[in-house]
Image (cartoon, rainbow, N blue to C red):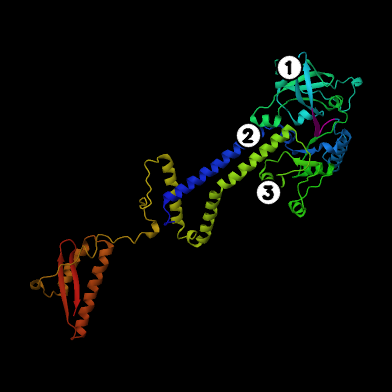
């Protein structure tokens, strides 16, 4: 830590934080774009707190000629799966509904009223189409529930139409046109409501060069196109575990998805069959985006004849955009990830030094000072100055502080003066003892009392040695000190 200046660490932390915040902002704005895609949110709208639902779709090639009877067979297989797994009961559709589905097809017809006419994309849809695709209404309402094979004699009018606002302005000159009549395919249709058209550039590209109208599939089949092939089937059903709804629809459509290894074993992987099944609800999740990026090489070229409706083309465009942002965010997170990994490795290699009890206070002091420096730098950047050559002054850790200096009574401060030769004289022990006594009456600190008592005791021992051994010669030097009284020094020759 001492080899790396705090300014460099601070710059690295700030850069990592900015990168992470950038990724969070990109994810937030992307999620807001996805929420505005009403055609991909049916699972969230239909689900409850107790039951999670998912939206799944199946797209068919026109060459397959999928009919209403084929759709009924798919629906029955799904109902059997849900019934066997106890997600629906005998009262399904009578007192409550646990799942919904819709199908659609597409054609082009001319719409006219009086002297005004235009060509529009006509979508033949089933009863619950607008439950799956709640296109914003401008006026009126959606199609009334009409049975798929209803006849005019049943009292139900299948010739209903919902037009977008572009058609309304071109034909009627306004949006409030519910109840008015238009002529299309040799039939007279009653306008039920007006819905929003393309709202942004992406939707305009997917919407195409023609405006759109919606009619019941029964009416669509009676405009000169008998047994019009159904190209899209969608269902919103319980999804208690991941891919449950997807697998239920895939089994009902007799679709078996090949893995990447199986595709690589084939000579050509361009043919995907005449049916494609996908899950709409989780198509923008990170695992789905990763799978999309990984299998993108298999999606570059296609030889099948599946055509997607405009809402699916919009969703595919957003998936492509989200996958690019996903890659970009992964690149932005490389530096923060490297910082975290490097920190973990450093802590692991230095775990014996960093986490022992002796250096614990040092580490905590360093982290505290670093956090305080970051806080001060953010609040008052002009007052802080971290140079690479000079580190800011900081107090030494408590562990590195040397032993406390001795009290005022120190050897260098109270060195005894060298006695003059003329003043040297022998003093009887009794006299020195008498002179020492007044000094002991004054209050003396414990540190100073110890050395003086040891000197006196040593003097007495030397006196005894003089009595026993005549060969020993000792000289007693007495030095006077005004502050400390009398100090005894014994010099042994």
Question: Which residue in the structure is indicated by mark 1?
Answer: 171
Numbered range of the magenta stretch: 95-107
Q: Is residue 288 magenta?
A: no
Callout 3: SS: helix
Using a 10 Å C-alpha cutoff, classify the residue at mark 2 as few (fewer than 14 neighbours), some (14 to 19) or many (20 or more).
Answer: few
Q: Is residue 345 left or right of residue 128?
A: left
Image quadrant occupied by the N terminus: bottom left
Between the C-alphas of marks 2 and 1, the distance is 34 Å
Provide residue 81's location: percent of width, then percent of height. Answer: 85, 42
Q: Identify the residue at image location x=21%, y=75%.
A: 459
Image quadrant occupied by the C terminus: bottom left
**Which numbered disc, 1 or 3, marks the residue that appears first in the sequence?**
1
State the mark number for residue 32: 2
Between the C-alphas of marks 2 and 3, the distance is 25 Å
> Which of pointers 2 and 1 indicates the residue nearer the eye?
1
Callout 2: SS: helix
Whether 356 is drawn above or below 425: the answer is above
Question: Which residue in the structure is indicated by mark 3?
Answer: 294
> Which of pointers 1 and 3 indicates the residue nearer the eye?
1
Whether 416 is drawn above or below 364: the answer is below
Using a 10 Å C-alpha cutoff, classify the residue at mark 1 as few (fewer than 14 neighbours), some (14 to 19) or many (20 or more).
Answer: some
Residues under numbered marks 2 and 1 in contact, where contact means CB atoms less than 8 Å apart: no
Provide residue 393's location: percent of width, then percent of height. Answer: 35, 51
**Which numbered disc, 2 or 3, marks the residue that appears first in the sequence?**
2
Using a 10 Å C-alpha cutoff, classify the residue at mark 3 as few (fewer than 14 neighbours), some (14 to 19) or many (20 or more).
Answer: few
182 vs 337, nearest the viewer: 182
Q: Identify the residue at image location x=75%, y=24%.
A: 120
């Amino acid at each position: 830590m001492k080899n790396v200046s705090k300014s460099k660490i601070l710059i690295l932390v700030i850069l990592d934080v900015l990168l992470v915040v950038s990724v969070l902002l990109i994810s937030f704005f992307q999620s807001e774009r996805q929420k505005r895609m009403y055609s991909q949110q049916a699972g969230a709208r239909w689900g409850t707190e107790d039951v999670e639902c998912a939206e799944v779709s199946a797209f068919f090639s026109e060459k397959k000629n999928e009919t209403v009877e084929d759709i009924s067979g798919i629906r029955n297989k799904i109902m059997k799966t849900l019934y066997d797994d106890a997600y629906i009961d005998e009262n399904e559709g009578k007192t409550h509904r646990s799942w919904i589905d819709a199908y659609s097809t597409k054609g082009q017809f001319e719409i006219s009223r009086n002297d005004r006419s235009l060509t529009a994309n006509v979508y033949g849809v089933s009863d619950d189409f607008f439950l799956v695709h709640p296109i914003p209404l401008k006026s009126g309402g959606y199609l009334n529930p009409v049975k798929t094979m209803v006849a005019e004699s049943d009292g139900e009018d299948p010739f209903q139409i919902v037009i977008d606002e572009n058609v309304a302005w071109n034909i009627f000159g306004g949006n409030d046109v519910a109840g008015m009549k238009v002529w299309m395919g040799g039939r007279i249709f009653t306008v039920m409501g007006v819905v929003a058209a393309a709202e942004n550039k992406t939707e305009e590209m997917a919407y195409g060069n023609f405006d759109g109208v919606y009619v019941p599939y029964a009416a669509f089949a009676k405009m000169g196109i008998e047994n019009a092939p159904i190209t899209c089937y969608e269902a919103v059903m319980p999804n208690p575990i991941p891919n449950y709804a997807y697998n239920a629809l895939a089994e009902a459509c007799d679709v078996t998805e090949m893995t990447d290894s199986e595709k690589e074993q084939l000579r050509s992987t361009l043919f995907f069959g005449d049916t494609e099944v996908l899950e709409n609800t989780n198509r923008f999740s990170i695992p789905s985006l990763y799978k999309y990026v990984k299998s993108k090489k298999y999606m570059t070229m296609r030889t099948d004849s599946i055509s997607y409706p405009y809402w699916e083309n919009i969703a595919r465009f957003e998936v492509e955009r989200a996958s690019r942002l996903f890659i970009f965010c992964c690149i932005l997170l490389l530096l923060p990830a490297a910082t975290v990994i490097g920190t973990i490795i450093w802590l692991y290699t230095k775990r014996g030094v960093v986490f022992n009890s002796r250096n614990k206070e040092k580490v905590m002091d360093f982290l505290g000072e670093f956090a305080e420096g970051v806080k001060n730098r953010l609040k008052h950047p002009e007052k802080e100055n971290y140079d690479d050559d000079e580190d800011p002054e900081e107090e030494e850790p408590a562990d590195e502080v040397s032993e406390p200096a001795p009290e005022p009574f120190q050897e260098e401060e109270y060195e005894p003066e060298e006695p003059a030769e003329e003043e040297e004289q022998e003093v009887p022990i009794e006299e020195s003892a008498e002179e020492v006594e007044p000094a002991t009456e004054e209050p003396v600190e414990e540190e100073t009392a110890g050395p003086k008592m040891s000197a006196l005791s040593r003097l007495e021992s030397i006196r005894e040695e003089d009595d026993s051994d005549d060969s020993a010669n000792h000289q007693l030097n007495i030095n006077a000190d005004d502050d400390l009284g009398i100090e005894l020094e014994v010099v042994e020759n």
